[in-house]
Image (cartoon, helix red, strand yellow):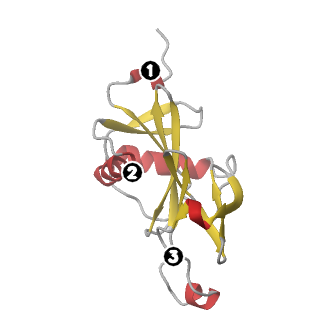
Amino acid sequence: MEWLSGREREEVERMRSNMEEEEGTVNNQTGIFPQSFVKIIKPLPESEVEAEAGAPTYSCLRCFLLTPSGVQTRDVCVQEDLTIQPTYKELLSRMRDVFKEDDISINYRDAEDDLIRILEDEDVQLMIRESRTQRDRIKRPANQFLWEIHVSATSDLSVYNSEA
């Protein structure tokens, strides 16, 4: 579901629902959202039995858009299993769709917290391998990918740690 906070739309991990409000998590904060402020993107299973019977499950990918004015965070729900390994082109295309920007670079944070630019499929594989080694460092919901995508403007090199 999306939380309509002012002019920004935030993806919310939906947990429970009743007739007047939704319970969910956004930006690592869990709370109750009035239904008049949310838009349901993907409905919850009707029952636990339906969820266990093989109804589609969703995984979340945490994404950050780094801009000179700040950082926008999105939790993107995807139907893929947490074990998938997307290609560079698939990730780039998805991030262009999510942030409505074309001239972007996709990045990840390594163990030293440096931003690393992803340029090809081998970089995606390295990101996934490194995220597995950092699994205990960051607590995530069970349905969230271990890795995160940091999106920056292609021309913005200021997001990278560099020493002259």
Which quadrant of the view contains residue 51?
bottom right
Residue located at (57% from left, 86% from top) = 46
- Which circle's residue, 1 or 2, is located before the other in the chain? 2
Q: In the displayed structure, does residue 76 sit left or right of residue 16?
A: left
Residue 143 shows in this picture: no
Tag of residue 98: 2
Residue 9 percent coordinates (x, y): 50, 51
The amino acid pointed to by label 2 is: Val
Which quadrant of the view contains residue 140?
bottom right
Q: In the displayed structure, does residue 54 sit left or right of residue 136?
A: left
Total marks drawn?
3
The amino acid pointed to by label 1 is: Ser
Q: Tag 2: Cα neighbours inside 10 Å, few (<14), some, or many (≥20)?
A: some
Mark pair 3, 2: CA separation: 19 Å
Q: Tag 3: Cα neighbours inside 10 Å, few (<14), some, or many (≥20)?
A: few
Residue located at (56% from left, 82% from top) = 45
Q: In the displayed structure, does residue 63 sit left or right of residue 26?
A: left
Q: Secondary structure at mark 2?
A: helix
Tag 3 residue: 43
Tag of residue 158: 1
